[in-house]
Amino acid sequence: MIEYVDRASGKRIVESVMGDKALRFAYETLLGRTLWTVLFGSKAISAYMGRRYDSPKSKKDIAKLASIPGCTPEEAEKPIAEYASFNEFFTRRLKPGARPVGDGIVSPADGRLMLYLNADADRPFPLKGATRSLRTVFENEAPAGRYDIAVIRLAPVDYHRFHFPCDCTTDAAVRIVPGKYHSVNPIALVRYPDVYADNERQILKGHAAFGDFWLVDVGAFGVGTIVQTFAGTTHRKGDEKGYFKFGGSTVILIAPVGAITFDADIVRNSSEGLETRVLCGMRIGV
């Protein structure tokens, strides 16, 4: 059972997992684990799924996703019937005003947020029972100093476009670190905790009033493509940065320690080992 705190209500929610049975087979059975090289060792399976969900034949799968608790098809910019494929709905834009941009620093994505505070490049920090460091996530090119890390885990029901969390300038292009395509669902993280170091990452350095920061977009099983849609090097808070095609995914926000004062409820929930459900554009700190 996976629980998180819904920020809007303050209640603990049991997460509904799309593909729960398949994930448990892949990660919790001996046979499933023997197939990891085939399933997750290359982009082939995820790319196949991507082609399948781009096909008009996949349109019938939209209703299944839309019916899962937490999915809000009424926020989509178009009625469900007008989407030509599953991936077109999965990567949907929303109606104007569906994600108002708050004050302060805002969440770059819909998802379940966990904070890891005061980490340096080599000090391991916990990720669902594993230990990782910024150096492994950055493939030995991590910045020096100490940093606060906000991990935002997206589920299939979420809005899958991601945005800039503040006014900033950035490098012109992301740095792509090739990798595997494991799931980022907690079921998978228990059995394969190195996902944040081993899955494909796309890293972008930004510059804001509080200093430099990094956004790391993490691919996952079923995510055949991470699409960066931003252009240029100057961005306003809330501007679209890109989107994930089908699959659960993750965005990591990294800032110098203390540069962002994260909101007390998120800090408290994280200290208790609980993710906080946030929406894109929602204030998460100042």
Image (cartoon, rainbow, N blue to C red):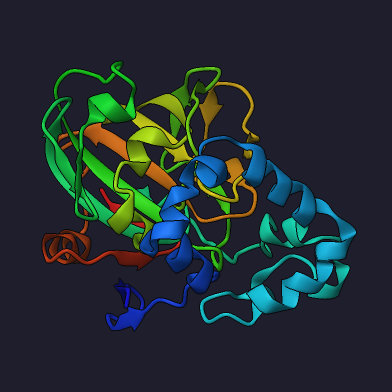
Q: Which residue is drawn at 14% across and 44% down?
A: 117
Count the marks: how many?
A: 0
Q: Residue at x 74, y 71 (%)?
A: 62
Q: Confirm whether residue 211 shows in the render.
A: no
Q: Is 137 positioned to the left or the right of 101 in the image?
A: left
**Is residue 132 shown above or below 34?**
above
Q: Is 286 positioned to the left or the right of 60 in the image?
A: left
- Percent of width and height locating residue 143: 24, 19
**Is residue 98 shown above or below 215?**
below
Could you say which is closer to the camera, residue 41 or residue 7? 41
Q: Which residue is drawn at 76% across and 56% down?
A: 53
Could you say which is closer to the camera, residue 178 or residue 255? 178
Work out which quarter of the rendered image holds the N terminus and state it.
bottom left
- Percent of width and height locating residue 36: 47, 46
Could you say which is closer to the camera, residue 131 or residue 227? 131
- Percent of width and height locating residue 180: 48, 36
Q: Is 52 positioned to the left or the right of 231 in the image?
A: right
Could you say which is closer to the camera, residue 115 or residue 230? 115
**Is residue 19 shown above or below 110?**
below
Q: Confirm whether residue 203 shows in the render.
A: yes
Q: Which residue is drawn at 40% across and 55% down?
A: 153
